[in-house]
Amino acid sequence: MKNLTYGKPLKLIFYFALPLMFGNILQQVYTLVDTMIVGQFLGVDALASLGAADWINWAILGIIMGLTQGFSIRISHLFGANENDQLSHTTITIYILSFIVAVLLTIGMQFIIHPLLTLLNTPDNIIQGSITYLRVISSGIIIVMFYNCFSSILRALGDSKTPLIAMIIAAIINILLDLLFVCVFHLGIGGAALATIVAQCFAAIFSFIVLKRKMPHLFELKDYQFKLSTAKRLLKLGMPLALQNTIISIGGIVVQSVVNGFGFLFVAGFTATNKLYGLLEVAAVSFGYAITTFNSQNFGAKYFDRMKEGVKKAGLLSLATSLLIAFIMIFYGKFFLSLFISGTPSEVSAVLSVSYKYLFIMSCFLPVLYILHTYRSALLGINNTVIPMLSGIVELIMRISIALLLPLYIGSNGIYYAEVVAWCGAAVLLYISYKILFNKLLLTNDNE
């Protein structure tokens, strides 16, 4: 486990983020392999089915990731403050809350999949594939929940290497099972979903074993009593983040409904770019986790000047990284996109045209996304999950407004701008809010 309350901030943040970055890249790789195998072996219809299911699937993942990330903020604070007794009690409470939420999500998803896809105007030729994919994926929610739970706790304690190893295991297993289930057993799009669940299961087991070996007291139930006050405190941190991700996904679902109206080839093109989206923001997410953990531990130790230095330097590093990734995608994006697309020459041409236009616009605005992640993560580190939630509402308003209005004036090209305008609105709110709240934090500390 790594204590981030001493040492050079930029070096600590960079080396903490590096394993997370490799892990996130691997996660994106096996997501991309899913898409490649589906697109190349099952065709454009199946690729479009995957795309129509994307935002609904992300909504569930967003709830899971929001809750577990929020829970882990409390872990970082306690670790930075050396409050080991509270650390053990809080961690066990996290396991209980995670299990309850996972069961509720699993049951709820089975009832809403078909009505939601119908409400989104999913084309008739792809809706059954989307239903199949979502039913299989949602059956593994409890696995995904505990994988994220263990990974978030490990990161909060300063261990970013174990989640990387877990992701390597998951990536290898997922790719092999993709090929086996889809290409050999011919299980179709459901086979791709099943491969993902099995891979996540192995990653969860590995993370559990390492966490139990390094921190065995985090699993001791002796003398444990469930305290409602602890649960409320954790939910106060986790629920706004889960709600933030849900709000963002609602905006994405509305965008998807507009995209569905342009036909399945447009859906396939949009899907291809959305699959690269993860690679576009992979460094932003990694730096974000590092900034949150760094700020959280130092917040617990009350090293506020150190937090200010760390966020400033990490922000500059994040911005430089975004410019590099944008350059690569603008000049080599068509090559990456072509890996997902198969069909007749006319279908390939139409899908590639849609996907590259969208990728080009997102790449041009990529620095804004990285600024958004930097200051959202910095706010989480100072125990504020409300402003990030409000930023999700800003994203929702911006994304839906552009998606519904701009296509009326400039046609299907208008839908490409919904995402980047949402980034801009949220980034402005987060930057201003962080500056105001952090200055208040420094002022309060000076007066004590």
Image: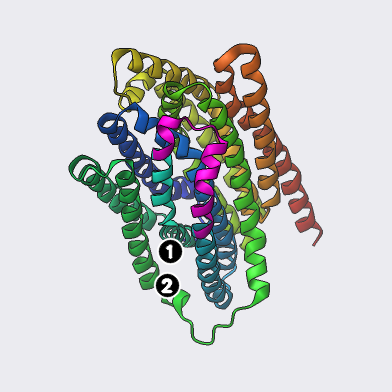
Report x, y in % for residue 103. 50, 64
Look at the image and tell me in which quarter the N terminus lies: bottom left
Q: How many numbered callouts?
A: 2
**Does residue 444 appear anywhere in the picture?**
yes
Say which residue label 1 marks: 1
Query: Where does the magenta region start and end?
Result: 107-128
Q: On the picture, is 331 further left or further right than 386?
A: left
State the mark number for residue 402: none
* Residue 283 % position (x, y): 46, 38
Q: Nearer the viewer, mark 2 or mark 1?
A: 2
Of pointers 2 and 1, the one earlier in the residue sequence? 1
As helix, strand or loop, the secondary structure at mark 2 comes to loop
Marks 2 and 1 in Cβ contact (< 8 Å): yes
Left or right: 412 as drawn, with respect to 398: left
Our reading of the magenta stretch's main secondary structure is helix
Residue at (33% x, 45% y) in the render: 190
Compared to residue 361, the image places residue 434 above or below, namely: below
| Direction left: furthest residue | 184
- For this view, does 217 lie left or right of residue 45? right
Q: Which residue is mark 2?
A: 215
